Image (spheres, rainbow, N blue to C red):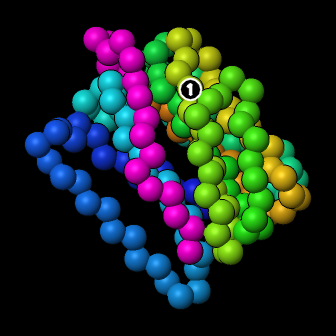
């Protein structure tokens, strides 16, 4: 299993972004699309980490030390169970999840105010092959808040 992180930054209100996902007949796909305000407008992605396992405890592993104190963190968990449910990890919020016959995916988020490395953890309802990932994004210096809105979660 893999969790690639794709992102578009500095998208203005005057544009209408489009995402096209093409699925091969032999692969299962789970995707999360989201929108975040208040990030830097020049390459906001800072650090990532991911690791897999076969337990109910999903972890991303730790990122390297963050580049700045104020960052927005997204944690992702995915499994091939197809009916599992997720429990949000400690210090995270806004758990969003999607289940499909081919597998499940969940996302959670938080903001931090320190440069310490971060890890995303979640609990899965069933023991199965799973993978966890975390991505950190730099918040703009002038931003006082960030927000997330889940545009689409899919599993096919």
- The C terminus lies in which quarter of the figure? bottom right
In the rendered image, residue 141, in percent from the top left (x then y), is placed at 32, 12
Q: State which quadrant residue 28 falls in.
A: bottom right
Q: State which quadrant residue 95 falls in.
A: top right
Indicate the secondary structure of the residue bearing disc 1: strand
Residue at 14%, 48% (x, y): give it: 15
> Is 144 covered by the magenta stretch?
yes
Residue at 63%, 24% (x, y): give it: 117
> Is 77 covered by the magenta stretch?
no
Q: In this view, does 127 lie to the left or right of 19?
A: right
Residue at 46%, 15% (x, y): give it: 70
Residue at the limit of the structure toward the left, as seen here: 14
For residue 27, above or below residue 82? below
Residue 49 in sight in this render:
no
In the rendered image, residue 16, in percent from the top left (x then y), is placed at 18, 52
Alpha-carbon neighbours of circle 1 within 10 Å: few (<14), some, or many (≥20)?
Answer: some
> Residues in magenta?
139-156
Q: Is residue 2 left or right of residue 129?
A: left
Look at mark 1 in the image and give the residue it sits on: 110
Q: Nearer the viewer, residue 25 or 99?
A: 99
Residue at 51%, 57% (x, y): give it: 153
In the rendered image, residue 18, in percent from the top left (x then y), is placed at 26, 60
For residue 139, above or below residue 37? above
Q: Which of 126 and 119 is in front in this view?
A: 126
Residue 99 in sight in this render:
yes
In the rendered image, residue 9, in percent from the top left (x then y), is placed at 28, 40
């Amino acid at each position: 299993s893999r969790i690639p992180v794709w992102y578009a930054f500095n998208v203005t209100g005057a544009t209408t972004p489009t995402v096209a996902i093409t699925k091969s007949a032999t692969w299962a796909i789970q995707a999360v699309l989201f929108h975040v305000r208040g990030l830097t407008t020049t390459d906001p992605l800072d650090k990532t980490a991911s690791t897999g396992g076969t337990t109910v405890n999903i972890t991303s592993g730790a990122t390297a030390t963050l580049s700045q104190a104020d960052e927005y963190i997204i944690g992702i968990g995915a499994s091939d169970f197809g009916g599992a449910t997720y429990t949000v990890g400690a210090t995270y919020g806004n758990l969003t999840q999607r289940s499909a016959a081919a597998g499940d995916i969940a996302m959670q988020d938080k903001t931090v105010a320190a440069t310490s490395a971060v890890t995303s953890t979640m609990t899965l309802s069933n023991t199965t092959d799973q993978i966890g990932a975390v991505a950190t994004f730099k918040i703009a210096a002038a931003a006082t808040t960030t927000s997330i809105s889940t545009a689409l979660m899919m599993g096919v």
